[in-house]
Image (cartoon, rainbow, N blue to C red):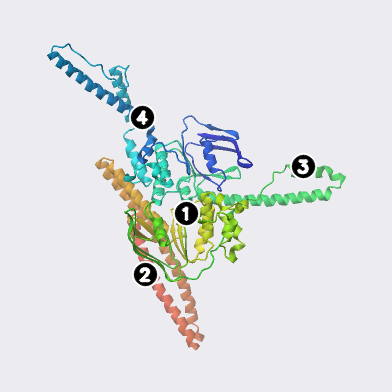
Amino acid sequence: MIRLDKVCLAFGSKVIFDNISLHIRRNDRIGLIGPNGAGKSTLFKLICKFIEPGAGGLVCAKGTNVGYLPQEGFVFRKKTVFEEAGSAFEDILELKSQIDKIHSHLENLSVQNETSVNHGLAKRDENFPPCSLPPHRGGFPDEDHQVILDRYAHLQHQLEVVNGAKVDAETNKVLKGMGFKESDFGKDISTLSGGWQMRAALSRLLLQEPNLLLLDEPTNHLDIDSILWLEEYLKGYKGGLIIISHDRAFLDRNISKVWELERGKIHEYYGNYSFYEAEKEKRRELQTARYVNQQKRIKEVERFIERFRAKNTKASQVQSRILMLEKMEKEELPENTVEQIKFRFPASKQSGITVLDIKDVSHKYDGRLIFQDICLSIERGERVALVGQNGSGKSTLLRIIAGIERPHSGTVKMGHNVLFDYFAQEHAEKLNSRNTVFQEIESVAPLSMVSRVRHILGAFLFSGDDVFKTVDVLSGGEKSRLSLAKMLLKPTNFLILDEPTNHIDITTKKILKDALLDYTGSLLIVSHDRDFLDGLVSRVYELKNDNIHVYLGSFKDFLEKKESDLQRRAADTGSKVLSPSKSEEIGSQKRQYLRKKEQNARRRKLAKEVQTIEDEIALRETQKRELDSVLSDSALYSNKEKCAGINKQYKVIVAELNTLYARWEAAQAELESMDDNGGE
């Protein structure tokens, strides 16, 4: 579909692309990754022909249609959200416009002819000669009436061929999938925030269905519901797809090839992001081995040269080896990455058991209720994710908890000895603009961390001379990263984080997640990054329908329920547009599918539980055997205190074993019952 041939591009002395050749095929699903500033967005602009390469060329197959979603700088052609999204169907809308014009013209013509006839009859009664008014052609002055009717019929046929009736239905479906409510459809698009403008632009792009879709950070402003919907939509997308994203889960689910842009070169990996990570590590090990072997060989050759340089009989051999070294293509060690950087939060005193207690909190903006009678509590050591649709009030609730806003009603109480810190994107504006990056973070670093400030800045993508930039010249994303790095250096026992992973890449997210996993305090995190939250939080609060809904268990469990709900809603929506009999059949199939999926998930969970219990039983039985051996030794009974202690341990282990046996029997019985009723 598109081929890049030996493309080179540089901005000043910085090389962006160094002789890269790529082939984009019709059904490719590619993840474009690389460090910030490597040139990923520039490659998109090159493919869209917004910029020209310094050397090399780009060849597009005939009929290639590229759709591009930038990170920012959206251009809108229509006024309202619905009009903007619907403008994707320009050809159909133009057909409809032509049909409406002809229809209006024919109606006017009919009315005027009728008026003409009636007028003539009236005059005839008064002994006037017949009079007919000239027909009004309404933009069709030179065309025969039959020609206009034929054109009208032809346009109607064209409209039926392209399924003109789909415009409103498809636009409605995609806008709702992107999180818009019907009440938002008529809003002036210029009044929306940047995030909602991005959603409108993405909606229009999806409806256009280009045969190559370029998405630059499409999940940045989407909530979890919208991300899940977008993934389902992209599953059925027929064209090629290239995605720039720091959302690992989104990449894993939507790509089958990775392009890694690094130092002006692009390296291809055939698989999803998880495959890329494993394969890159293998390549790194091989590259290191090649480098070590080559260095060993070079030293051997250099020793030969030094040893025989002065001997005439060896002159030709020495020269050949010198020439060999000069022509040898040198291997390089893999580039050091910030993956090796790790840091721990500074220690803080322990909080009381209850960290946060919220009772009957309600809040309004301009008379509009945001949430009502919210009650929740967080205890020491708990890690909680707060999720919900954009606009549901998550950030507002965090500001109330942090004391930045006062609730309309209700109480928010921090527990004993709680030292909290709060991170939000707007905190970037509170940085000292006169400081350098290094000075700004050094000002809050405890003595134990001062020596590692440069490493921590590297983890947040400030390396080399970047640390000496003044804060006032940083971009919005750079300021957010610096603000987050500052916060993570303060001693706290409760962290309140609002979208902490925006503007940081996958590697830095891993560093941050590892640090949070080692953090001994409590966490409350607003985020839509599934990979970041998975394994980090143990409870999920969803802000939905003006109130809090609690999900106990891992974030993965929560996601499985959301996906099941999404499929169920899709099944219900699909059934409404089918005939009743077909609707019932497909609805039944969907229900069977969902029921089967739930049963399979339950079966896997039970099998895992049985295995865990069996491992625990094996451990307890080993301990019991050891105690049996001790108890069989008559020497034990000479020490009454030790004997009593051993007997107590023995009773505890026997009781635990009895409990484990009962749990195993219950789980195994349920598992066998499920197998008897049908397998996967």
Looking at the image, do the residues carrying marks 1 and 3 touch, with CB atoms under 8 Å apart? Answer: no
Q: Distance of mark 4 from mark 2, alpha carbons? A: 71 Å
Counting from the top left corner in percent of width and height, residue 389 is at 38, 52
Residue 387 or residue 58, whichever sits in front: 387
Q: Is residue 566 above or below residue 79?
A: below
Counting from the top left corner in percent of width and height, residue 450 is at 60, 63
Residue 580 or residue 227, whichever sits in front: 227
Looking at the image, do the residues carrying marks 1 and 4 touch, with CB atoms under 8 Å apart? Answer: no
| Total marks in image | 4
Residue 619 or residue 185, whichever sits in front: 185
Q: Nearer the viewer, mark 1 or mark 2?
A: 1
> Which amino acid does the dot numbered 1 rest on?
Glu
Graded by Cα atoms within 10 Å as few (under 14), some (14 to 19) or many (20 or more), the crowding at tag 4 reads: few
Residue 573 or residue 341, whichever sits in front: 341
The residue that label 4 is drawn on is: 94
Counting from the top left corner in percent of width and height, residue 43 is at 54, 40
Q: In the displayed structure, does residue 101 sit left or right of residue 332?
A: left
Choose the circle earlier in sequence order: 4 or 2.
Answer: 4
Choose the circle earlier in sequence order: 2 or 3.
Answer: 3
Choose the circle earlier in sequence order: 1 or 3.
Answer: 3
Q: Distance of mark 1 from mark 2, alpha carbons? A: 54 Å
> Which amino acid does the dot numbered 2 rest on?
Ala
Rendered image: mark on residue 662: 2
Rendered image: mark on residue 426: 1
> Which amino acid does the dot numbered 3 rest on?
Leu
Looking at the image, do the residues carrying marks 4 and 2 touch, with CB atoms under 8 Å apart? Answer: no
Q: Distance of mark 2 from mark 3, alpha carbons? A: 78 Å
The residue that label 3 is drawn on is: 323
